[in-house]
Amino acid sequence: MPNHVTNVLTLHGEPEQIRAMLEAIQYDDLGIGSVDFNKIIPMPESLNIEAGSQTSTGLKAYQDFIEVYTLGGTIHQDDLENIPHKSEDAFLRQRSDIRPEEWELGKAAWNNIRLYGVPTWYGWRNHHWGTKWNSYGYGEAKVDYQDGDALNFLTAWSAPHPVMEKLAEMFPNVEIEHEWADEDIGHNCGRYRYQNGVRIEEWFPETEREAIDLGCELMGLEPLDYGLALNAAGTDYVNLEDDEYEKIELLGRCRYNSLPFEINRSREADETQRLKYRYLDLRNPAVKKNIILRCNVIAALRKAMMEHDFLEITTPILTASSPEGARDYLVPARKHPGKFYALPQAPQQFKQLLMTSGFDRYFQIAPCFRDEDARGDRSPGEFYQLDMEMAFATQEDVFAVLEDVLPPIFAKFGTYDVASAAPFRRIPYNTALETYGSDKPDLRIDLTCKNVSKLFENSEFEPLRGQTVKMVDISDCTLTRKQVEKLLSDCEVQSGSKAYWFKVDEKGELAGGIAKFVTDLRPQLEQVLTLAPNTLVVVAAGASATKSAGVLIKTFGAACAGHMDQERYEFCWIVDFPMYEIGDESGELEFCHNPFSMPSGGLEVLLKAERGEIDPLTITADQYDLVCNGVELSSGAVRNHDPEIMVKAFELVRLGEEDVKKKFPAMYNAFCYGAPPHAGIAPGVDRMVMLLAGESSIREIIPFPMNKNAQDVMMGAPSTVEQKQLDELHIQITALEEE
């Protein structure tokens, strides 16, 4: 049972105004004098689902599905709105424990989180109403408000302050006095007064006596009903059952009777509640330690960079919009109607301009802003990176700095004791895809994939016939058939493609799965695979065979004992990235990574592509990624510092010199005055700390993170603003988010 909070509303104003308010907010089945919160702040109908064990079970299952579905790829919010039924079906085939009604409840709850930040009515009401239930306590009889009467009702655990604020806003001509008191007398009580739509007065008892007196007044009781009486001095109440008492001075009083979660077990609470009450969540020592770790890591990075003679220079937050791969956050310019600043996706242009200015070693712990969807290893909105740039530098110079800076930090602060020593392994981009099925390989896993497409050009098994076929052989595999098929279903959900399997049993015979379709090819397969007894072979086929093989390696590498050295940090460089690619949406040539990268071969290779002598898709760039344990920590490049080469690189993607001047005016002009060769990189601080802390979600290492829907539920951001502010900025709202 909750603690019941007595609420008393006293109204002042013109009778017709008060009457209009009462008619607008009444419970239809109770009449005037009652208060229906849903008529003041309506709750979306989709949230009206069970907030119990079935929904919790279903939501956990659906979250497991989403985690499997999105693993290893960039999944945009639009994609999550139209998840293929085949992916859901593939997941449910291996989860026979999930009942259909639980799955539908969980799916609805997950969509509610995506739309509203909470799964059910419970979280929404607590956030928007300030209490979990609508008003109650009217009894069986009809309510009838008379002039001069006060509205009396009960709420659960706390007073409905957001509702009262909205009510005052809706009826600014009515003065509202709201008093409340918890049945646990002497706690959680006070008075607010609203006038002209805003709160103009608030009062909280300063002494225990004042709190008890207010509670008794609102509930129509006497202190003696609680066994309380004034002390000899007539200043404070004492319990008549106590022989002795002592006065305790409260320095910071909790005005609520309960906490949203148990502090030391806050990590078990619903994430929405954790983020809403993040200041309480951070009191948990297990949560706090990650923030302390983050502070220590940043201090160590800063010290190391300065020891390498880098200057810490801050760059602007308000800048110009530029095409850097993600959506910009735009800031309207009040003094320049119709124009906008952009929050920087990265200090890319500024740090290159610093190189042209004569600063040869720059760094900063840089805030970056990108309007992207959240993932486990990516925070929406804002993140931080160790941004650095070096003049007269090559790829080797950049590698040397990070290979000197990072290993000691990972060795000192990491959850695991072992970290790669310099030099880090270097893997060409195409080799990474062919060998590991990913440009973010986890080198703790010893599995690789082999291309056997030629062997299946005329296969009897139609899904493999004439397709790209890649196989991963896993020695000493003890997984059962049921376990194998469950993992394959997980992989199907993640990659969108069905995978297959066969094994070499303890007798050395091919068995299970698609064994009958590969038996005749065993001699040829043994030339590329190890087919010793107790070897499992998993198979990916089709247009997405490479991606599927990468998912198979990660999934089975983690699941099969002896194939993943979990407790270590393995770094590698991915090098020789393509300069260009064919865009998925445009179907035309686009930059693959950073448009500011120097093409390998310089101007000459671009001219050859322009003349049709080489395919532009074969051009590589002096770009590189730093990867650790399958997580991309950073992208970097040797920069294009020559305006002629820059223009030619953009001409291949249908942008001319005037476009370059318009999009990058400062950089183009600076390069025209002569710029030194330079190179840089920017490891993600948040991802780095996440790896060091051994966390799977980046939100665990950010002091005040947004939720997966890019909302700050604690501060209520993003939020609406007053019309006056919009008018000053010459902005008109054409669409509103559904509440």
Image (spheres, rainbow, N blue to C red):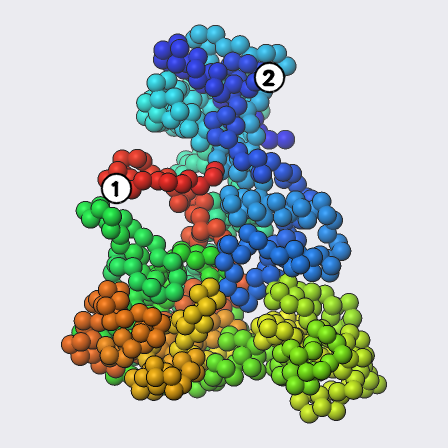
Q: Which mark is residue 118?
A: none
Q: Quadrant of the N terminus?
A: top right
Residue 646 in sight in this render: yes
Q: Please name the amino acid that badge 2 sits on.
A: Asp
User: Residue at point 66% right, 41% down?
Assistant: 52
Identity of the residue furthest to the right in this view: 507
Within 10 angstroms of label 2, few (less than 14), some, or many (20 or more) residues?
few
Q: Please name the amino acid that badge 1 sits on.
A: His
Q: Nearer the viewer, residue 604 or 335?
A: 604
Report which residue position mark 1 lands on. Answer: 730
Q: Which mark is residue 29?
A: 2
Q: Quick one: label 2 or label 1, which is nearer the N terminus?
A: 2
Where is 397 relative to 68, above or below? Answer: below
Q: CA distance from mark 2 to mark 1?
A: 46 Å
User: Residue at point 73% right, 59% down?
Assistant: 93
Residue 737 picture location, percent across and down: 44, 41
Residue 38 picture location, percent across and down: 52, 28
Where is 704 relative to 438, above or below? Answer: above
